[in-house]
């Protein structure tokens, strides 16, 4: 029987967390002389002199409705990078525990592993960028605490098949972390709807992509209330600032606008994929379920430098596993994509 308490590092289980002024008194009315704020106001005309809600209750309430889950199943972080780091700190003992990553994938998982002195076991995706399930199951041992699955995957842009992920969720005693940063572009259903079926499931999403709010730094983690409690226990007290919380509330009233932008991006993606397919220096355009495409080129380094010399910046991914001579290209506006295609066509 899965029990989060058995997974958490012992010193985190017994840790006495910081108790903020807003933890100790949660009422909204009163004379607030408890947090050493500036009672006279702020140097700006806005109402910024009070500390924000440490648990972002209003945002979570609204977000829970949009995502069809419970507020207690949500953690908000300073970008997705914060919950990624907190998962390591909560569950992985340095120099002892390990995690499984599946390259080519998002680079922060390995950076967080290295920062936290946790071994990252790398099991490559198959050549069509799917999970090598036998190899992953074989690599799991009693010290393996987290398995990171990125779907749609960065940089390959494809969604990962659900059956192997389900196998991991059913057979692995640690946490399966599914990063759905690009889910809005995929047409797949989110794993959020499976939260109640798998106590070891953690889903990451972000406001940085489809919502167009990368500057705010607002990431989401969805998991059982028990896992969310652990993350809350170790996060910095006021990790999401008041401005971000207010803007997130506004954003959540604009789901339609987000959906419209996704539609526009998908339509541009289709145009871009088709045009790239006819570009002589492009050997292959990999199928994309994200807001970017991975392309195999005749010479990634040369083409990258040529694009930069024309002030078109893409990502050279040719040094990462399974991505020889590959460039990763974000879907831009029609005008930006045309600029890219014009420069590529002139090679
Ligand atoms: C797969 C994946 N997860 C997470 C992130 C980062 O998200 P955030 O901006 O919320 O930190 C990225 C950013 O590129 C990403 O590709």
Image (cartoon, helix red, strand yellow):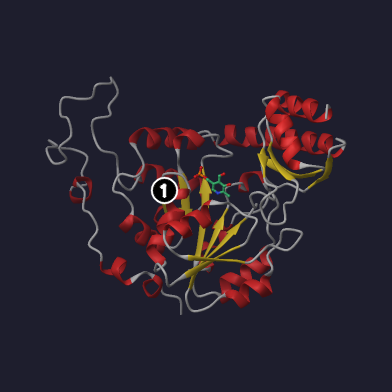
Q: Residues within 10 Å of mark 1 (few under 14, many from 20)?
A: many
x, y percent for residue 223: 46, 60
Q: Residue at x 68, y 41 (%)?
A: 292
Which residue was labeled with disc 1? 76
Front-most of residues 22 and 79: 79
The correct choice, above or below, for 196 with respect to 56 in the image is below
Residue 222 visible in the shown view: no
Which quarter of the image is occupied by the C terminus?
A: top right
x, y percent for residue 339: 74, 24
Taking the image as shown, residue 62 lies to the left or right of residue 300, namely left
Looking at the image, the residue that sits furthest to the top is 45
Taking the image as shown, residue 225 lies to the left or right of residue 129, namely left
x, y percent for residue 22: 22, 45
Front-most of residues 40 and 260: 40
x, y percent for residue 57: 35, 46
Q: Residue at x 62, y 48 (%)?
A: 183
For ligand 1, tell me if the residue under mark 1 lies within 8 Å.
no
Q: Quadrant of residue 268?
A: top right
The correct choice, above or below, for 295 with respect to 72 in the image is above
Q: Residue at x 22, y 50 (%)?
A: 23
Taking the image as shown, residue 323 lies to the left or right of residue 258, namely right
Q: Residue at x 79, y 42 (%)?
A: 299
The correct choice, above or below, for 92 with respect to 327 in the image is below
Query: Dot 1 lies on which element?
Result: strand
Q: Quadrant of residue 133?
A: bottom right
Q: Quadrant of residue 137?
A: bottom right
Residue 189 visible in the shown view: yes
């Amino acid at each position: 029987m899965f029990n989060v308490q058995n997974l958490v590092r012992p010193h985190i289980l017994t840790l006495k967390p910081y108790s903020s002024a807003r933890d100790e008194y949660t009422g909204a009315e009163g004379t607030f002389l408890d947090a050493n704020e500036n009672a006279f106001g702020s140097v700006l005309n806005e109402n910024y002199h009070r500390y924000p809600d440490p648990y972002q209750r209003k945002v979570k309430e609204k977000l829970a409705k949009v995502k069809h889950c419970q507020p207690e199943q949500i953690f908000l972080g300073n970008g997705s990078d914060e919950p990624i780091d907190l998962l390591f700190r909560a569950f992985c003992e340095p120099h002892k525990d390990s995690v499984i990553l599946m390259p080519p994938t998002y680079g922060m998982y390995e950076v967080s592993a290295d920062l936290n002195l946790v071994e990252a076991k790398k099991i490559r995706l198959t050549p069509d960028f799917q999970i090598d399930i036998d190899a992953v199951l074989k690599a799991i041992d009693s010290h393996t605490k987290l398995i990171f699955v990125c779907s749609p995957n960065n940089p390959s842009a494809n969604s990962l098949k659900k059956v192997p992920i389900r196998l991991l969720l059913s057979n692995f005693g640690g946490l399966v972390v599914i990063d759905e940063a690009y889910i809005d572009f995929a047409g797949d259903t989110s794993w959020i709807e499976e939260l109640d079926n798998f106590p070891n499931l953690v889903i990451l999403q972000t406001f940085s992509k489809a919502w167009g709010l990368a500057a705010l730094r607002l990431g989401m983690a969805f998991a059982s209330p028990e896992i969310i409690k652990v993350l809350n226990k170790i996060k910095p007290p006021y990790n999401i600032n008041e401005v971000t919380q207010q803007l997130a509330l506004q954003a959540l009233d604009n789901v339609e606008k987000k959906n419209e932008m996704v539609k526009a991006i998908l339509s541009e993606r289709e145009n871009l994929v088709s045009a790239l397919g006819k570009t002589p220096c492009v050997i292959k355009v990999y199928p994309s379920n994200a807001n970017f495409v991975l392309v195999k080129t005749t010479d990634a380094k040369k083409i990258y430098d040529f694009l930069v010399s024309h002030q078109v910046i893409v990502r050279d991914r040719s040094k990462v596993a399974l991505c020889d001579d590959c460039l990763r290209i974000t879907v831009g506006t029609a005008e930006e994509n045309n600029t890219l295609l014009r420069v590529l066509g002139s090679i």
